[in-house]
Amino acid sequence: MKKIDSRFRHLPEEDALEAMEHHKKLEEAPAAYNAYLKADYYGEKKDRDQFVQQDRRRFLDLIGKSGIAAGLLKGSALVGGILANRHALAQTAVNKRVVFCYLNSGAASGQWMPTSASQMNQITRAYGPQGYAVSDICHFRQIDVITGGHQTALNSLGVTDYSSPTMDKRIAAVLGTSTPRASIYLGAKATTSGTLCSNIGPCQDSPTQALASIFSGTGGGGGGTTPDTTYALSYDAQLRALDSIKAKLSTQEYARYQEHIDSLKKIKTNTANANSSSSSPNTTNCGSTITPSMANMQATGKSQADIIVAALACGITKVATLQLGNHQGDWLGHNTSWTQDAHQACHGSPSNAAFIEMWRYLNDVPAYLIDKLRKTSGPDGQPLINSTVVVQVTCMGNGMDHSSGNAPFIVATQMPGFASGYSARSGGNIYDLNGAIPKGMGLTGINLGTSTLGLV
């Protein structure tokens, strides 16, 4: 038996051992980060910088020819997105997007992997014919996350040393140079306890606040310097900014962005209803059987998914991360038989019934996100899923025993560069899966892993 550090003796033995490992990695992080920076400088950085510099020069040239004032671009995320989309359409290499979606604690052994595109397992029901019917574009993978257990959320995005940039941050450094936001990071009960899955930046758990932040504008439609702090003011600012450049847009561009504004207005109404105790279940986009409440994991997760899809469609960003729960799993189900939190469901041995139910409930959100991308048009008029890859990640294999093997991951897309259709297989590790994403997207200067696991 390993000796327990005196600082952690108040914890159960299993939790104490994990806390000791976590603390050790935190102490080693500065040295590991310096080693990463040194290796990156003499390796991948040169290729990556060349790609970014060429893209930025082309974008700045486009801005100069657009006739749109720089102040208006700074004041309106939506107007900036118009030019970002116009630029992306002219540059095939950067007309690509990625969304990472984290679910904590893996899945119960034998209950996740489907047997075919039409035959889902207990936990993956939402992806198949009984749910959103998106399994035909999903690649289901069971891989080794190397160091399973609590406090290893960063593992899910390819980092095991607590310091190197997570994969979303690495991709944002390449794709985020010509969009108003390099990336966005939203969550549902992600920031309440424990470690986050990404080091891309602060995570926003409130859909209402996320709307105000991501779609912010200046009070004078480009002339002021103070961002609006409410979504209502932001919406008005975006509308004024769009109207002011109408003459400079093509008929198609203006029509498309008017549609986006209408969509954002609808999201605003949905989140307002979700925050109101008097609203009825049928007034939100979260489904007729779900009570609109920010305490509801599905409702919050789907609202955040709506915001991410809108931001991608508007050209505000090309990189997004959605974190559903933190590594401790202190979230509750809604209308589930299991009434304790998800963490206790992991410790429900010898029965795995609660664990299966809670993770089937949570998997409804990423399935909804994939379906939403399939149904929403991008700036090229094609479904966003054609230019977006969704990467569903986790930090464990089976949360009931904290193992690292057979961790459930999904890659869903119709983007050229990735294998098409449905597939399901086991093997490989967290480096391989994360490294396959920039390879499939055609991005240079981001190398990780030795195999693409049949994804590319």
Image: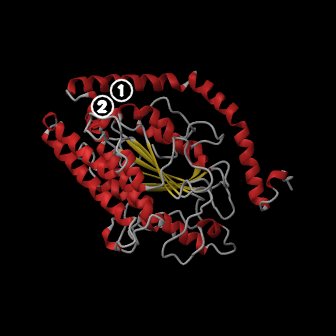
**Looking at the rendering, in which quadrant would you find the N terminus?**
bottom right
Please tell me which residue is depicted at 29% across the width and 53% down the height of the picture: 264
Q: Relative to 171, does residue 69 appear above or below in the rendering?
A: above
Name above or below for residue 102 compared with residue 289: above
Q: How is the image coloured?
A: secondary structure
Quarter of the view holding residue 43: top right
Residue at coordinates 53% horizontally, 59% vertically from top-left? 189
Seen in the image, is 275 located left or right of residue 254? Answer: right
- The residue pinned by badge 1 equals 55
Give the residue drawn at x 31%, y 41%. Answer: 217
Residue 196 vs residue 377: left or right?
right
Looking at numbered disc 1 in the image, what kind of residue is underneath it? Asp
Q: Which residue is mark 2?
A: 91
Report crowding for label 1: few under 14, some 14 to 19, many 20 or more residues within 10 A (C-alpha). many
Q: Measured from the top left, where is residue 28 in percent x and y?
A: 72, 37
Looking at the rendered structure, which numbered label has been put on residue 357?
none
In the rendered image, the vertical position of residue 28 relative to residue 364, given as above or below? above
| Image location (x, y in percent) of residue 115 | 49, 65
In depth, the one of 69 and 381 nearer the eye is 69
Neighbour class for label 2 at 10 Å: few (<14), some, many (≥20)?
some
- Mark 1 and mark 2: span between their CA atoms? 8 Å
From the image, which quarter does the C terminus lie in?
A: top left
Quarter location, residue 305 = bottom left
Query: Is label 2 in a helix, a strand or a loop?
Result: loop
- Residue 413 in view of the camera: no
Viewer-closest of 49 and 261: 261
Mark positioned earlier in the residue sequence (1 or 2): 1
